[in-house]
Amino acid sequence: MKKVIGIGLGLIGGSMLLSLKRFWSKAEFLGQDINKDHLDKAIDLGIINKEAQKQDFKNADLVIVSIPVDIAPNVIHELLNQIGSNTLVIDTGSTKTKLCEHLKNHPKREQFMATHPIAGTEFSRPQATFSELFDHKTMIVCEVEKTNLKLQQLAIQCFEKMQMKMRYMNPVSHNKHMAYVSHLSHISSFMLGKTVIDKEENERNIFDLAGSGFESTVRLAKSNPQTWTPIFKQNKTFVLEALSEYINNLKNFETALKQDDFEQLYKEMNNTNVVKDILKGIHL
Amino acid sequence: MKKVIGIGLGLIGGSMLLSLKRFWSKAEFLGQDINKDHLDKAIDLGIINKEAQKQDFKNADLVIVSIPVDIAPNVIHELLNQIGSNTLVIDTGSTKTKLCEHLKNHPKREQFMATHPIAGTEFSRPQATFSELFDHKTMIVCEVEKTNLKLQQLAIQCFEKMQMKMRYMNPVSHNKHMAYVSHLSHISSFMLGKTVIDKEENERNIFDLAGSGFESTVRLAKSNPQTWTPIFKQNKTFVLEALSEYINNLKNFETALKQDDFEQLYKEMNNTNVVKDILKGIHL
């Protein structure tokens, strides 16, 4: 690869560029960001060499789009109109159904690959980027058969260099699973944070009394609402399904506690302890 | 100190002994555990020298009780009957109201100190112990004025060696704050784990698709139900209050999402982002 462009230079997009730079150190890395401060910061931090210009898209090898999921469909649609015939475009968004639907009849659909790296932190912006973010993580690819073979190979070469595990899914399955294993966790964490903040008006009490357990469960409440509002919007149906089941489980726990049914509480917690074994799998 | 006894040799009790051993390396460390395997393991791991016998309590300097909160009141009541006149007894339980109430008229109440170290991991048993668990963490002390001055000094000497931050509260305030910053986190995490496990019958999907965000929010669902069932039982009123507020917040989020009120979702998440600053305080 000789030219790589990042559109959106935050945690995911910026880290993806840094990651690739390790293996294609002589390539030109360019970028665009709607936020001028982020663009400047990305240049300062050496994430990109300079801002990408319109003509750069004609001969870019790879364009990585990492922007909020509500604006991604139109941006990528327009981008496909501008790229050269050998350019691959990938996105990294947390929802896939609307994007794939929006692009399905684009004459250059085969130059696009819908991808979602299962990696991130609760931080955002170029300052949060690091080159190892995706190493050994899972990369979900949707509708892989719609991307032309040569460009598939380029993408896979990139992801294999980072030793990512590839998983192939259709967009609907992707969105459904993500509602449970990712999007619901964010809601649970945001609302836990809200509940405690509303109660503990005197913040000193939280400083002093909260331990690592609270910190762990509330970590995702630091996430960027600009990223997450459009994710919940785009995945509304599955998120509502997951949220409703979560609320029901909490209500059942509440009922058992109200009725002093401690055997039931014990049983539920004991059954859920199986997450020990499931979570081990994440690190395999 | 010449003789320290631990009753209950799991994560908290065992780690407390290991922690003190660093500063009183010549003292005798003895222990008891209702589970014979845990007792043997604690000896194997060098947490204690041998099992404590009845006569050991007569001349022990310190007895640390780290057992489920439902049995602690009776065990400590009986223990106070057995100790010598210079022995200090402390407990480490996550609830304090019933314990303090139960012991308030005991003739040796002044030889007891009700403490709660804000430290732990999601693991249990002697195998999970480590000597640094309490270093720089918060130690809550309830009804400190009821412990005699000389024994207060001994306790504070121990906690200061571990560089713990001391916080003094009454048992009711303790239980109320803990319902929000600790007990609710556990319920939120257990029920999140349950929701995802129930849905994802094929566990491979969780292995592959869950990232560090899910792992973080569900970490506490690995906790021991034997520890947590009696905590929820003893702190039922405040836990129900916190849980009800949490469920309401989740329902409001659900309603806003159903009604496409994305401005409201954004606002709630943005307001909750303040946890960034609050959590920094935990590490100060």
Image: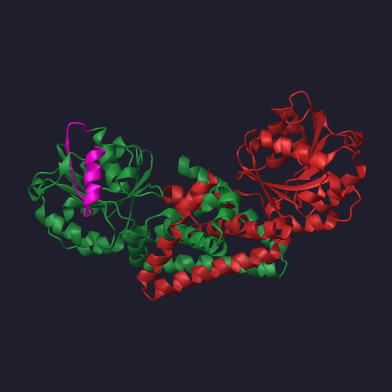
Chain colours: A green, B red
Q: Position of residue B281 (x, y in %)?
A: 52, 48
Residue at x 74%, y 37% (from the top left corner): B38
In screen coordinates, is B21 left or right of A176? Answer: right
Please state which of residues A171 and B19 is positioned toward the viewer in this rendering.
B19
In screen coordinates, is B240 left or right of A67? Answer: right
**As displayed, is residue B108 above or below residue A239?**
above
In screen coordinates, is A278 left or right of A226? Answer: right
Q: Position of residue A127 (x, y in %)?
A: 32, 43
Q: Residue furthest bottom?
A: B259
Q: Where, quadrant-wise, is the N terminus of chain A in this rendering?
A: top left
Asked if one can make out residue B9 in the rendered structure from this viewpoint, the answer is no
- On the image, which quarter does residue B47 sit in? top right
Asked if one can make out residue B147 in the rendered structure from this viewpoint, the answer is yes
- On the image, which quarter does residue A230 sit in? bottom left
Q: Position of residue A173 (x, y in %)?
A: 37, 59
Residue at x 35%, y 61% (from the top left corner): A231
The magenta-colored residue range is A24-46
Question: Is A37 covered by the magenta stretch?
Answer: yes
Question: Is A191 covered by the magenta stretch?
Answer: no
Task: Count the marks.
Answer: 0
- On the image, which quarter does residue B239 sit in? bottom right
Q: Position of residue A216 (x, y in %)?
A: 52, 49
